[in-house]
Image (cartoon, grey):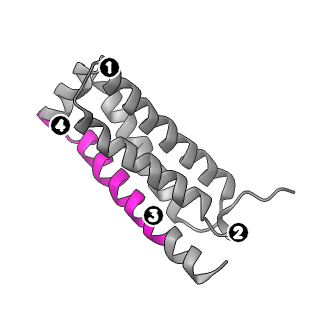
Amino acid sequence: MSKRNKIIYWIATLWLALGMTATGIVQLIPVKEEAEMIQKLGYPLYFLTLLGVWKLLGVIAILIPKFGLLKEWAYAGFFFAMSGAVVSHLAVKDDVSALFGPILLIVLTVVSWYFRPETRRCSSN
């Protein structure tokens, strides 16, 4: 793996981890604005806890060494959660500004996944 690709991977991965950690924590603590937003999107309040827990577990999975299959699931979960957020915001006709965070996290997910080192991939054995 080239030095350039390592730098791209770590920048994308650390930004992704920071974004998912921050939003995961906000979803786990009782923040009024977050509760109002999730209900506006049509989801029950307990969905915040599920998202928060899975985001934090996903961050751990992508940052720890090895466990390629677990990382694949974490990346897939991030992609599904953020693409679901985009669709949800579009469905309730939210402002375009509401799409910025989820789209940024989708891009970081794809970039981190694409540039991940061989040691962080699923073995094809």
Q: Residue at x 38, y 62 (%)?
A: 15
Which quadrant of the figure has residue 34?
top left
Relative to 55, 119 lies left or right: right
Q: Which is closer to the viewer, label 3 or label 4?
A: 3
On the rendered image, what quadrant is the C terminus found in? bottom right
The residue furthest left is: 32
Query: Is 33 above or below relative to 68?
Result: above
What is the spatial separation of the Cα atoms under label 1 and label 3, in whole angstroms? 29 Å
- Labels 2 and 3: the sequence-earlier one: 3
What is the spatial separation of the Cα atoms under label 1 and label 2, in whole angstroms? 38 Å
Give the amino acid at mark 4.
Pro
Secondary element under disc 3, as helix, strand or loop, is helix
- Labels 1 and 4: the sequence-earlier one: 4
- Magenta stretch bounds: 10-32
Q: Residue at x 40, y 59 (%)?
A: 17
Which residue in the protein does label 2 denote? 118
